Amino acid sequence: MIRYYLDQTLSLMAAAQCQHPALARLRGRGPWSASESPGGVMLQRGNAAAWGEIKNGLDGLRYQLADPLPPIMSSITVDERGAVAFIDLPGCRLPIKLAAYAPVSIGLDGTPQGPCDEYGQAGVRLWDRLNSGELLVADPELIAFCRLALMSKTNLTAELVHAYNLITTETIPQIFDTANGIPKAEAGGG
């Protein structure tokens, strides 16, 4: 249902294993099949009778979506294990890893030093910005955090998150609150 194009020569095995730095963010988001494409390689997940136009994605990759895009829940896998909260979005119910459970680094003296992954660090920064009144709904860091939240317990890619219209001005506060474990009543939801 999605194809990625990398304009560099790479062995098909290395491409399928996402060994190139530009493909690293796709690791674990497959399964991927690799084939040669003009000037590089193509990674594909799923099949389609027809494909849409090739568009620019993140990190210098180009991508192409199945046309039409299949229903989201038939296109992804979810992992409901661990510290998760569920979010109801148009057309799907997804698990999200709670940001408070992101890995925390431990210092030499054995004390916690703070979150050690991008998701946890962004959660702390955004929470601080929210409390100081500096956070707008379309803030790029908040949007990136919402993508990470939606990808935390699924094999969605950044491009698929947006292709399925999961991030909107209405869902951003809902995703942020869910990722931070804020109950709907406290968040003003219902």
Image (spheres, helix red, strand yellow):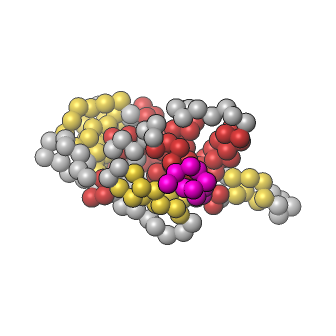
Q: Is residue 41 left or right of residue 101?
A: left
What is the x, y in percent for residue 1?
A: 25, 48
In this view, the residue farthest toward the right is 109
In the picture shown, does residue 141 fall above or below 98? above
- 181 in the magenta segment: yes
Range drawn in magenta: 178-190
For image coordinates 46% across by 52% down, the residue present is 151
Frontmost residue, 60 versus 16: 60
What is the x, y in percent for residue 103?
A: 65, 59
In the picture shown, does residue 190 fall above or below 165? below
Instruction: Determine the image quadrant of residue 62.
Output: top left
Instruction: Determine the image quadrant of residue 166.
Output: top left
For image coordinates 52% across by 32% down, the residue present is 138
Judge whether residue 41 can be spotted in this image. no
What is the x, y in percent for residue 33?
A: 28, 52
For image coordinates 33% across by 40% down, the residue present is 163
- 80 in the magenta segment: no
